Image: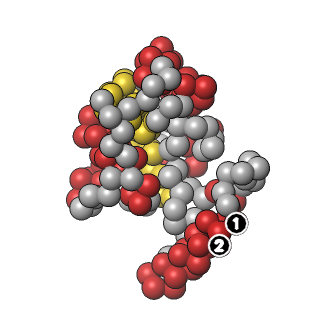
Amino acid sequence: MYPGLAVATTTAILAALDEAPTIGDVVQRCLAHVDEVVVVDDGSRDGTAERAARAGARTLRNAQNLGKGASLRRAAAEARGDVLVTLDADGQDDPADIPALLVAIDTGADLVVGSRFRGAFQPGAITPVNRIGNLALTAALNLLHGARLSDTQAGFRAIRRALWQRLPLRAAGYEVE
């Protein structure tokens, strides 16, 4: 999609639960940077699926809420891209940052994790306890694995499909991060 990049095709996948106010904008902004957007409406009752479809997403629906992890696995199974980009449907991740993830993939990374700590949090976006817990978990994982991550729990990621398919993902909810 980008001149000069070797990334063949990209799909943004979003799990969404009652995100009607934001989903259309997120989908449209993603489509400026990826080849397709797949949204799994995870049991919404507010028109999320319809707004996502009107914005240009391929939309799948769970009849009941199955959780973020289950929805992302379902979206990935339906995606056509060689690279999958996951991001939150509520607009907390800026789709304009997708190219930065794709450049890292293009230069050889199999997985790129975005960071909420490199930008600004909206008021109430993360509790102080969650922030401290995330920073502690990130520090521990960096120490154990020699990584240099700043936000291990970020949902904004790019991953090669081949790697995704090898991961034994079983988490149903947010623990998928």
Left or right, residue 168 beside residue 54: left
Say what secondary structure mark 1 lies in.
helix
Q: How many marks?
A: 2
Distance from label 1 to label 2 (Cα)?
6 Å
In the rendered structure, find residue 33 and report the number of the disc placed on it.
none
Disc 1 residue crowd, few under 14, some 14–19, many 20+, Cα 10 Å:
few
Instruction: Identify the residue shown where x is 45% and y is 25%.
Output: 45
Left or right, residue 13 beside residue 75: right
Q: Which residue is mark 1?
A: 128
Q: Closer to the camera, 47 or 156?
A: 47
Left or right, residue 39 beside residue 24: left
Q: Which quadrant of the view contains residue 29? A: top right
Type of colouring = secondary structure
Q: Are marks 1 and 2 in contact (CB under 8 Å)?
A: yes
Q: Which residue is mark 2?
A: 132
Instruction: Identify the residue shown where x is 44% and y is 17%.
Output: 50
Relative height, residue 155 to residue 25 (above, below): below
Residue lying at the far bottom in this picture: please name it. 144
Instruction: Identify the residue shown where x is 66% and y is 57%.
Output: 126
Say what secondary structure mark 2 lies in.
helix
Which quarter of the rendered picture does the C terminus lie within? bottom left
- Residue 159, given in percent of the width and then of the height, sits at 39, 52
- Residue 169, given in percent of the width and then of the height, sits at 28, 58
Relative height, residue 37 to residue 110 (above, below): above
- Residue 87, given in percent of the width and then of the height, sits at 50, 44
Left or right, residue 163 beside residue 174: left
Q: Closer to the camera, 53 or 33?
A: 53
User: Amino acid under label 2?
Assistant: Ile
Instruction: Specify whether residue 39 is in view.
Output: yes
Q: Closer to the camera, 51 or 97?
A: 51
